[in-house]
Image: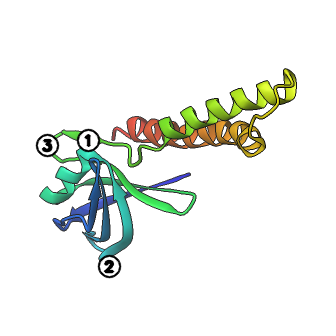
């Protein structure tokens, strides 16, 4: 997990794809004072950040990179306002499927219930591990955003 802080002006942009309140941008352009303009490709954003990106403007922007995915997770404006948004909604899905798979693993391997799917029994505990991993990534990003109140 890495969070990069970009102080500059974001060029207003519309999402290239949007689904269930989350969006993806083909390109986000930042004008950084005393430096070359910065461009980020294939950036995700959560519901609250979509409006901030549409608005554009000056601020302190937080770009998170986790496991290859890039996302604009937060902004602090010069007027003191701040916005943070998570950029995905797959944690609850992974948790539910992981719990169901773990329940089949317990039924199959501990209680010896016949007919329980083997694949679900193996993937369930792995998905629970993935859920803990993704959750810890998201919480670390949020802690970084909250701690960087300067």
Q: Are marks 1 and 2 in contact (CB under 8 Å)?
A: no
Left/right of residue 22 with respect to residue 77 in the rendered view: right
- Expressed as whole percent of the image width and height from the top left, the position of residue 102 reads 71, 31
State the image coordinates of residue 140 (x, y, percent, origin top left). 52, 39
- Judged by depth in the image, the label closer to the viewer, 1 or 3, is 1
Looking at the image, is 87 positioned above or below residue 94?
below
SS under mark 2: loop
Q: CA–CA distance between discs 1 and 3?
A: 12 Å
Circle 3 is placed at which residue position?
79
Of residues 61 and 53, the one nearer the viewer is 53
Q: Is residue 81 above or below residue 106?
A: below
Judging by the rendered image, the residue that carries numbered circle 2 is 36
The quadrant where residue 72 appears: bottom left
Location of residue 16 (image quadrant):
bottom left
The way the protein has been coloured in the rendering is: rainbow
Q: Identify which residue, 79 or 56, lies in the foreground.
A: 56
| Residue 26 on image: x %, y % | 32, 72
The local secondary structure at tag 1 comes to strand
Q: Quadrant of the C terminus?
A: top left
Provide the residue designation for mark 1: 83
Q: Residues within 10 Å of mark 3 (few under 14, many from 20)?
A: few
């Amino acid at each position: 997990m890495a969070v990069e802080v970009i102080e500059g002006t974001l060029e207003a942009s519309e999402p290239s794809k949007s689904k269930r309140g989350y969006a993806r941008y083909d390109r986000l352009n930042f004008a950084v004072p005393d430096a070359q303009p910065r461009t980020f490709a294939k950036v995700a954003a959560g519901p609250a950040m979509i409006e901030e990106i549409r608005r554009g403007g000056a601020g302190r922007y937080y770009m998170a990179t986790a496991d290859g995915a890039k996302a604009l997770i937060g902004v602090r404006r010069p007027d003191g306002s701040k916005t943070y948004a998570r950029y995905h909604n797959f944690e609850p899905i992974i948790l539910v499927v992981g719990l169901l798979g773990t329940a089949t693993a317990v039924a199959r391997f501990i209680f010896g219930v016949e007919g329980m799917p083997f694949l679900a029994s193996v993937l369930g505990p792995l998905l629970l591990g993935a859920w803990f991993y993704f959750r810890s990534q998201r919480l670390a990003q949020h802690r970084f955003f909250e701690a960087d109140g300067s």
